[in-house]
Amino acid sequence: MSPSLPLPTAAATPVLGTPHDLPKPPGLTWRVQSREPVGYDVNIVRGLLAPANPVLARACGADGQQPTRCLVVVDDKVHTLYAERIRAYLDAWRVESFWKVLPGDEAAKELDSAVEVTEAMTAMGLLRRTEKVVAVGGGVVLDVAGFAASLYRRGVPYVRVPTTLLGQIDAGIGVKTGVNHGTHKNRLGTYYAPETALIDPEFLATVDPRHIVNGTAEIIKMALVKDAALFELLETTFAGAGPQSLAAGGPAATEVISRAIAGMLDELEPNLWEQVLERSVDYGHTFSPSLELRADPPLLHGEAVAVDMAICVALAHHRGLLSADDTDRALRLMHTAGLPITHPVFTTDLLEEALRDAVKHRDGFQRVPLTDGIGRVRFVNDLTREELGRAREFVRQRAAAQGVPEDAGVLAAAS
Ligand SMILES: NC(=O)c1ccc[n+]([C@@H]2O[C@H](COP(=O)([O-])OP(=O)(O)OC[C@H]3O[C@@H](n4cnc5c(N)ncnc54)[C@H](O)[C@@H]3O)[C@@H](O)[C@H]2O)c1
């Protein structure tokens, strides 16, 4: 027997010419995965424009020693009322400011306004990472400026300074930006977090009363969907000092605002990009997007939300989810706040059409949040036209029984 040769093992002796040693051809399919951490601060800061207060300056990357620059995108009314103080503050911190003044109000929330903001960035030669866009205004200016910031060079950092009640407890603290298009609210938009949101309740002192009432709608929403204690606090605050007391400061106002912000952030944080489409913060936002821009004269965002919430209160009541007493309390709170609870544009046909649009927005299901007692929600997917009609009629009769003509809240507040 001849001595046996050691048997080659696959690892030690690749056989030349087999596919193993040939360079691999490129594949035909790749998968790229990445995560972008999002972190931003929301701070309530009184005296934001006091020259000794460093918070806004720091948000602009200023230390008072090295010169810096920023673009201030500011609401026109805020500009009239506060431009001098903002400019003096920024000068004191050696921030060279460039300004873009935008009209507030819904009519100006359009693509052209966002493009104009990007043009202002080009005109000043905004540095892409270090120089900030500082948006100062109500929800409209914040949404437009945030949208522009998300588009410009695919994203530049921005700071939000909300100056209306609705801005401070809602529009200014999430990550959504957008503009209206056609008759559709926020049809074009992005998710784009600010670096920080700085909330100074002192801005509320100059806000028109109707816009304070407007902001209360989103606070009532948070109370209805997750904070029964906030609901009770609102009942006592509105019955005693009235909704305008939220603009005057004081301990109750501070507690209301901070509870509303906490509740809102609690709901937004785990679902910033809305992967989960069952969102309790969508309460009051099922039918209202179709109503808001169609009413003539147009309703404010919070007013449309209130009319939607009133329908949802009735829907919940008819499904046995909300007692007669809590149904009364909810409708009364909206009315005491000065919000409308019905509107003539809201026919059963429009409610049905609005629900159809919401189903598209919510990827094929109704996912309508309804109160399950005050302070809790449950989602339903089987609302019928009959229920919508009955709910509408219920609210209409309640309003009439209280001697409230349709859209009286709007008229009272506007006059
Ligand atoms: N991005 C979000 O997550 C989000 C959430 C809720 C609402 N929104 C949007 O917010 C918008 C509504 O925001 P809004 O109610 O603040 O309206 P708004 O921005 O139109 O402001 C209301 C009015 O108040 C004026 N104003 C602003 N600050 C002032 C001040 N301190 N003193 C005096 N006047 C002042 C404005 O010029 C305007 O006339 C809607 O377009 C809505 O879609 C966005």
Image (cartoon, grey):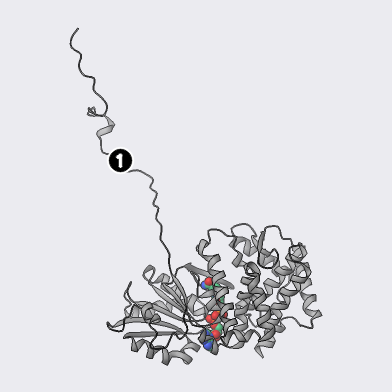
Secondary structure under badge 1?
loop
Residue 211 placed where, x, y %?
Answer: 59, 84
Residue 92 placed where, x, y %?
Answer: 34, 89
Exactly how many numbered labels are in the figure?
1
Return the residue nearer the eye: 373 or 21: 373
Pick the quarter of the image with the N terminus. top left
User: Does 55 appear above or below 273?
Assistant: below
- Label 1: how many Cα within 10 Å (few below 14, some 14–19, many 20+): few
Question: What residue lies at 41% left-to-right and 70% top-to-bottom?
Answer: 151
User: Does 415 appear above or below 194?
Assistant: below
The type of residue carrying mark 1 is Pro
Q: Quadrant of residue 344?
A: bottom right
Residue 270 placed where, x, y %?
Answer: 51, 61
Question: What residue lies at 31% left-to-right and 75% top-to-bottom?
Answer: 127
Pick the quarter of the image with the C terminus. bottom right
Q: Is residue 105 visible?
A: no
Q: Is residue 15 left or right of residue 183?
A: left
Please name the residue that numbered disc 1 is placed on: 25
Question: What residue lies at 61% left-to-right and 75% top-to-bottom?
Answer: 219
Residue 318 placed where, x, y %?
Answer: 77, 64
